[in-house]
Image (cartoon, rainbow, N blue to C red):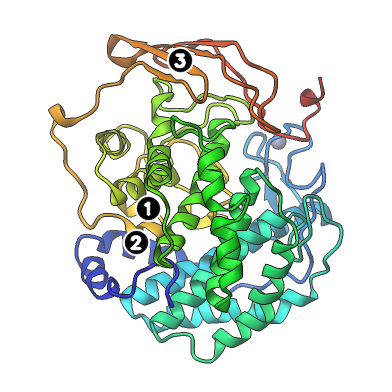
Amino acid sequence: MSLPLSLEAPERRRVAVRGPLSPLAASLRRDLQPLFDIGFEIPRQKALLSREGGRCPRDGVPLEFDPYRPHEHRCPVCGESFSGERQYLAWVMWYQLWLAERSVHAAALHALTGEAVLADLARSILAGYADAYLDYPNRDNVLGPGRPFFSTYLESIWLIQLCIATDLLEMSGGAQSLGGVVRERIVAPSSAIIASFDEGSSNRQVWNDAALLAAGRLLDDRTMVEGAVNGPWGVKAHIERGLLSDGSWYEGENYHFFAHRGLWYGVTMAERAGMEIPTPLRDRFQEGFAAPLATVLPDFTFPSRRDSQYRISLRQWRFAESCELGLSRAPDVRHATALHSLYAPGAASARDTGRWRSTAESERNEPASALSRADLGWRSLLFAREQASTPSMEDLALPRSALMEGQGIAVLRRHGGSLYTALDYGQSGGGHGHPDRLNVLLMHGDERWLDDMGTGSYVDPSLHW
Ligand SMILES: [Zn+2]
């Protein structure tokens, strides 16, 4: 049984992790050290979504997430710190996702380096959740049933991490007797909750599918696996109908990345399970890695279309990882060019990339940062190419005009890409589409003449008009 990593790969990968991927392994290992030094505690309360929780009452922006500070939440704009129960219960949501991801982060490192304390760490997180899971009440929910969270898709993202951590531990002999307990006390009851709430066509259902696929594989439940991949709104249906002909997800750029990461889990696990994804769908999924690069603005942010937050930079480790995972599946000059730009010395100032506080796949955007391959995540440790590609200047893709017919956006670029204009004209595109077509964008380098402000928050009063 193996979900993400094929059984014959580990030995070869261990060699790469001692060689070209050793800076990445060392950097990922450093992120885990505070868990040994400070420890962790599994919250016994269920996360709560509220208008006040997690936002600065003055500036309306999300408060910083620090997993080691449960009762002190700083505003990145005014610098003031906030506390109280609603702030804490908003923090709990991020913390549960963060801690679940640390189990797979530690298990992946253990599988490839053999360091025993990493298996201990992954096991203690899994055992802690096996103890706590059924005590979280399945009530006070917002978007579907769930226990640790108020929405089903969050539980799905969380469960995927725990399933892959369990699988990696079992593969590397580090699970001891824990696998059965995790299956009985977390995977079976959690997947039953997720299976009870099919959201149909939705970026959230992409995550429910991936969770059911992971759980079905661990539980050896063929029906669950089949439904997650081949069901009416399974992985294949979402590739066919959620991804448009140009490879872009039918909602804005933010949901493109979110849904495409979920599809990555679905496609990768389906392939490992020996299930066929038809070539046209595989090609469309593959195109999804490059699609956001077609509309990227001259300052390497993506357009704030539809529900996107404003002026989000692609110079974040998560976007580099997306390009790396695309390249690991098939060569593509567009990914190589994007990585060349992301890794270029001096392209952005060096700062904390924020990877250490990553909340699994429910991303919190960080400011632009200088990046290298050592800043990638645990998925890259398992899947990225062993060696970085070093394309010559002639091999790089020049910034080009593009017409994305499926999405309905046309981009014209001049002056080596520094002059950019776009017409956003497509369909409204479902629940997150908004009837806000016919925008014209005009940028010259960093200067924004005509812009789309996006929709950064669902609870900000400015949305109500
Ligand atoms: Zn503030």
Which residue occupies 68% across, 36% down?
Answer: 61
* Front in this rendered view, residue 460 or 14: 14
Residue 340: x and y in percent read: 26, 36
Residue 355: x and y in percent read: 47, 53
Number of residues whose C-alpha sits closer than 10 Å to that of mark 2, classed few (under 14), some (14–19) or many (20 or more): many
* Front in this rendered view, residue 47 or 218: 218
Q: Secondary structure at mark 3?
A: strand
Which residue occupies 77% across, 56% down?
Answer: 150
Q: Is mark 1 within 8 Å of ligand 1?
A: no
Which of the two discs, 3 and 2, labels the residue nearer the N terminus? 2
Which of the two discs, 1 and 3, labels the residue nearer the N terminus? 1
Quarter occupied by the C terminus? top right
Left or right, 192 with respect to 339, comes to right
State how far apart marks 3 and 2 are (Cα): 36 Å
- Disc 1 target residue: 376
What amino acid type is highlighted by mark number 3?
Answer: Ala
State how far apart marks 2 and 1 are (Cα): 8 Å
- Disc 3 target residue: 410
Q: Secondary structure at mark 2?
A: helix
Q: Secondary structure at mark 1?
A: loop
Relative to residue 253, is residue 384 depicted above or below? below
**Which label was assigned to residue 381?**
2
Q: Total number of numbered labels?
A: 3
What amino acid type is highlighted by mark number 2?
Answer: Leu
State how far apart marks 1 and 3 are (Cα): 31 Å
* Front in this rendered view, residue 389 or 125: 389
Labels 1 and 3 touching (C-beta < 8 A): no
